[in-house]
Image: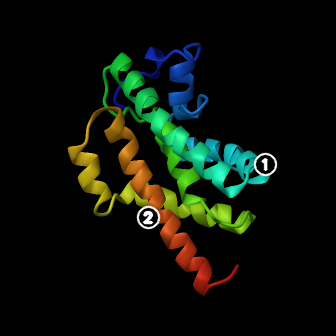
Amino acid sequence: MTKSVTQFKLSDPVQFLALGFGSGLAPKAPGTFGTLAAIPLYLVMALTLSIPSYLVLTLFISVVGIAICGSTAKKVGVHDHPAIVWDEIAGFLITMAFVPLTLVNIVLGFALFRLFDIAKPWPISIADKRVHGGLGIMLDDVLAGILACVCLHLLLAFIPF
């Protein structure tokens, strides 16, 4: 990681959320751990919400994430610090939109989202380089989530699991 994680305060509600409930403090692969932290939230949402409610809450999480991630990055003085993983949570929730709830689909969605989040193909790479602040932190993961969602739906359409 680029800076010590001791500068973060889990007692600060904004930082607690930005750090994915603490999952972003994992010493290795914090983005992967942040995405794993999204799975229980996804399960609760998928099991209890209608599709429109799921989409509205996912949009809310994404929009609020701009402020959450931007504020935390500013407090620690590092743009898109690896420990800031709220964007991964939003990206995974986007990935799973309209996807039937099965273990296989969760694993596929997780793998596709992490692939696109790490590889950053176009247009994700452009957003990652050119957009800064809280919006920049969120945008590349939102785009990775959209791309992973499209690919997951195509995969499920051609290879039913």
Residue 26 vertical placement versus 73 (above, below): below
For residue 11, which quarter of the picture? top right
Q: Amino acid at mark 1?
A: Thr
Q: Which is nearer the eye, 108 or 60?
A: 60
Residue 147: which numbered mark, if any?
Answer: 2
Mark 1, residue position: 48
Q: Residues within 10 Å of mark 1 (few under 14, many from 20)?
A: few
Q: Is residue 26 above or below residue 6?
A: below
On the image, the x and y values in percent for residue 29 come to 49, 43
For badge 2, the amino acid type reads Leu
* Above or below, comparing residue 102 to residue 82 in the picture: below
Left or right for 109, reference 140: right
Please identify, in this view, whether the residue under mark 2 or under mark 1 is nearer the observer.
Answer: 1
Residue 96 location, quadrant? bottom right
Tell me which label, 2 or 1, sits earlier in the chain: 1
Above or below 141: residue 11: above
Determine the image quadrant of residue 147.
bottom left
Residue 25: image tag: none
Within-10-Å neighbours for mark 2: few <14, some 14–19, many 20+: many
For numbered disc 1, what is the local secondary structure? helix
Residue 107, image x and y in percent? 64, 62
Element under label 2?
A: helix
Residue 150 spot, x, y in % from top left: 49, 69
Give how far across and how far down residue 97 sits, in percent. 60, 59
**Is residue 28 in view from this perspective?**
no
Q: Where's the C terminus, which quadrant?
A: bottom right
Q: Nearer the viewer, residue 30 or 18?
A: 18
- Residue at image position (27%, 50%) is 127
The residue sitting at 66% across, 61% down in the picture is 106
